[in-house]
Amino acid sequence: MPVMCALFSFATMAQPGALDEEFGSGGIVSLSLGPGNKHLKAMALQSDGKIVLAGDVGSDAALARLNSDGSLDYSFGQEGKVASDFGFDFNGIEAMALQPDGKIVAVIRGSTIFTNYAELIVARYNVDGILDDTFGENGYIIADTDFHTEIGRAVALQPDGKIIVATTADNSTTSWKLLISRFHADGTLDSSFGAEGFQLVSFGEDKKFLTSMALQPDGKIIIAGSLERPALPLYDFALARINSDGSLDPGFGIEGIILTQVSSESNRITFLTLQPDDKILATGFAGNKMALARYNINGSLYNSFGTDGVNLTQIQGLTTYGSSAVLQPDGKVLVGGAVGNDFSLMRYTSEGILDEEFGNGGVVTTEITSSSDLIKGLAIQPDGKVVGAGNKFVIARYLSGLEVATSSLPIPQEAALAYPNPARQTVALRYALPAPGRISIQLLDMNGRLLKTFAENERRGPGAQEETINLPGGLPAGQYILSLSGTGGKTGVRITIQSR
């Protein structure tokens, strides 16, 4: 018998932008992970609220996991920490993604001192931090390409479990190539993608940088970074969209490529994310200003956002930098980065204007150390609190003021709210309402993007309910979320959709 869940009242956070005193020490956690320099490159939130951090410490690839209160999770690795040496002089995690089963996929840079060459390594860790020996050989693979240097910059997971890695690669450092590779869930190359699993993306011969990647619900891949202007040592925003077979998508921009000169100075995208309506948010910098742009699904700028699709922000004449972004459930945009040497968190309305209700005129800065600090990873917890992870493994948590659903009855991870599961064409969703109300039912991918709405603000009576959901055709096999929301709160159930 499926376990029932009820929808409960909302709780409101106060003081939007204030540090959360319940996290770490005064809202801040600074990790000591061992000797040597440390660089955080990625952060992710688990479904249970734990925080996974990735980067490098000394010469080792490093992972750490925190409990939701900021303490180290001693069930992970060695007292909450993992250090991995893959046989190179330097080993560092550049990007990370969490699988639905909690395993961690890490893209690692392995480099040697004397040659200055770098190899692309893809590794997978179990939920306890131990390398997963069912992936590659002993938990990792070293990609075999024709390049001397391959540096993985981003990773994304398809619903069918395949792994997409975006890489800068070349035999010299003068003209980087953009290389996309796709792997099966066991770490073997997917020969149906590009040329035996690899696809070069041509932006011409000018210098280019790859920084971020996002996966659309239809399987298309968007990559972002910057491209040098002809005859000038200045760069512009650059995006490309790639079909699921590795070819450029001619329906995006000009033959699959978009270049945007957001200012007369050097401009670079540092982070890319997709909205539920498939619009594209890109943040980065334009000279000394933070740049935030919103694009339509076809690659054109969304002119109702900011000024003709772009917002440039500089705080108190200091260098202002965007390096991460996340969309709130209410449509507002949070951008993490730096103002001068300090953490910065800026919030914009859905129209691209600084939100006066957040921090000081839409901006919060936090002094962490006396040297350069910036927020590299940004996420919103289920309770609405905002976690920002800094480049030196310093984590801060802020109050957002979001109204979030809270429940006095936790739903077990194994709760059976939908059946059959796995499903192909239809699935039944069972739930209970404590009183009459209006509900909405939506299908989301594992990144939270809306795929289909089955019911919107429809009235239901009290008590047990059962909804028959006709699943849309054409979805890749994999895991999805059935989201159930109402005036009293929100819940969801993970389902597996099989190929028809």
Image (cartoon, rainbow, N blue to C red):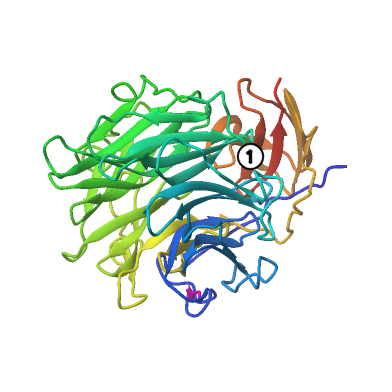
Name the quadrant containing residue 419: top right
Q: Residue at x 40, y 38 (%)?
A: 147
Disc 1 target residue: 439
Could you say which is closer to the camera, residue 2 or residue 58?
Answer: 58
Name the quadrant containing residue 464: top right
**In the rendered image of this protein, does residue 230 appear above or below residue 18?**
above
Name the quadrant containing residue 262: top left
Could you say which is closer to the camera, residue 401 or residue 237?
Answer: 237
Which span is picked out in magenta? 27-31
Q: Residue 111 in the image: state x and y as whole percent.
A: 44, 55
**Principal secondary structure, stretch drawn in magenta:** strand
Direction right: furthest residue: 1
**Residue type highlighted by circle 1:** Ile
Q: Residue 339 in the image: state x and y as whole percent.
A: 27, 65
State yes or no: residue 352 in magenta.
no
Q: Residue at x 52, y 48 (%)?
A: 121
Instruction: Tell me the element at label 1.
Output: strand
Could you say which is closer to the camera, residue 95 or residue 252?
Answer: 95
Q: Residue at x 60, y 47 (%)?
A: 487
Q: Is residue 459 left or right of residue 300?
A: right
The C terminus, quarter of image: top right
Q: Residue 95 in the image: state x and y as whole percent.
A: 48, 51
Direction front: furthest residue: 114
Q: Is residue 378 left or right of residue 103?
A: left
Q: Is residue 279 visible?
A: no
The N terminus, quarter of image: top right
Could you say which is closer to the camera, residue 479 or residue 187?
Answer: 187
Q: Is residue 82 left or right of residue 283?
A: right
